[in-house]
Image (cartoon, helix red, strand yellow):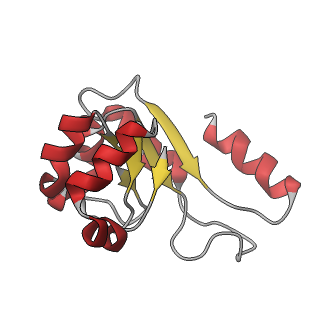
C-alpha cells in the first residue's frame, strides 16, 4: 500500500509510476487529493499494472457514500474527521451513521473498512475502537 498526492504522479508520469509500483510490489494506492470522479485518468494504468485504487469516504461524502462503496476494490478507507489528525480533543463525526450508510449500499456489506483517526491518549483511542466495532 502506498499513499501519495497527485502532483508527484503527474510529475513522474502515470505509466512510469504505476509500472514502478508493480515492479516494487505495491498493489494498492491511496491518492487523497484525486477525486473519485477523476480516477478514470489513471484507470488504464492501474488496470494494466494490477494496482488497486483505494477510495476515501470522508464526513463530507454525503452524496458519494452510496456510490463509492460499490465501486471500491480492496477496502474502504473511512476518514474520521476533517483537518489535521491528532490535534483535537474530540471527534464529533458520527462514524456509526457513515458505517450504516455504507453497509446499506448494494454490494459492500462484506467489504473491509479501514478507519483513519489519530488521538493523543490511549483512553480516547479505546473509546473510538469500541464505537467502531458497533
Report x, y in % for residue 24: 45, 40
Residue drawn at (40%, 28%) of the image: 111
Q: Position of residue 85 (x, y in %)?
A: 64, 70
Look at 62% across and 41% down and name the residue there. 132
Residue 74 visible in image: yes
User: Would residue 27 be found to the left or right of residue 53 on screen?
Assistant: right
Question: Residue reaching furthest top?
Answer: 110
**Nearer-the-camera pick, 23 or 31:** 23
User: Is residue 67 depicted above or below 34 in this figure?
Assistant: above
Tell me, yes or no, if residue 54 can be seen here. no
In front here: 32 or 12?
12
The mark tally for this picture is 0
Q: Is residue 74 above or below residue 32?
A: above
**Location of residue 60 with respect to 74 vertically, above or below:** below
x and y percentages locating residue 117 in the rendered image: 63, 57
Q: Position of residue 39 (x, y in %)?
A: 19, 55
Q: Quadrant of the C terminus?
A: top right
**Location of residue 54 by image quarter:** top left
Classify residue 14 as left or right of residue 54.
left
Please tell me which residue is depicted at 28% across the width and 35% down the height of the picture: 105
Amino acid at each position: 500500500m502506498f499513499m501519495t498526492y497527485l502532483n508527484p504522479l503527474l510529475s513522474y508520469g502515470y505509466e512510469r509510476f504505476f509500472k514502478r509500483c508493480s515492479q516494487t510490489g505495491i498493489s494498492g494506492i491511496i491518492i487523497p487529493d484525486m477525486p473519485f470522479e477523476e480516477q478514470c485518468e489513471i484507470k488504464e494504468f492501474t488496470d494494466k499494472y494490477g494496482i488497486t485504487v483505494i477510495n476515501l469516504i470522508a464526513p463530507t461524502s454525503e452524496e458519494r457514500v452510496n456510490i463509492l462503496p460499490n465501486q471500491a476494490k480492496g477496502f474502504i478507507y473511512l476518514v474520521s474527521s476533517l483537518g489535521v489528525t491528532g490535534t483535537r480533543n474530540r471527534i464529533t463525526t458520527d462514524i456509526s451513521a457513515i458505517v450504516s450508510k455504507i453497509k446499506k449500499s448494494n454490494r459492500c456489506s462484506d467489504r473491509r473498512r479501514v478507519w483513519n483517526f489519530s488521538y493523543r491518549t490511549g483512553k480516547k483511542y479505546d473509546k473510538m475502537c469500541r464505537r467502531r466495532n458497533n
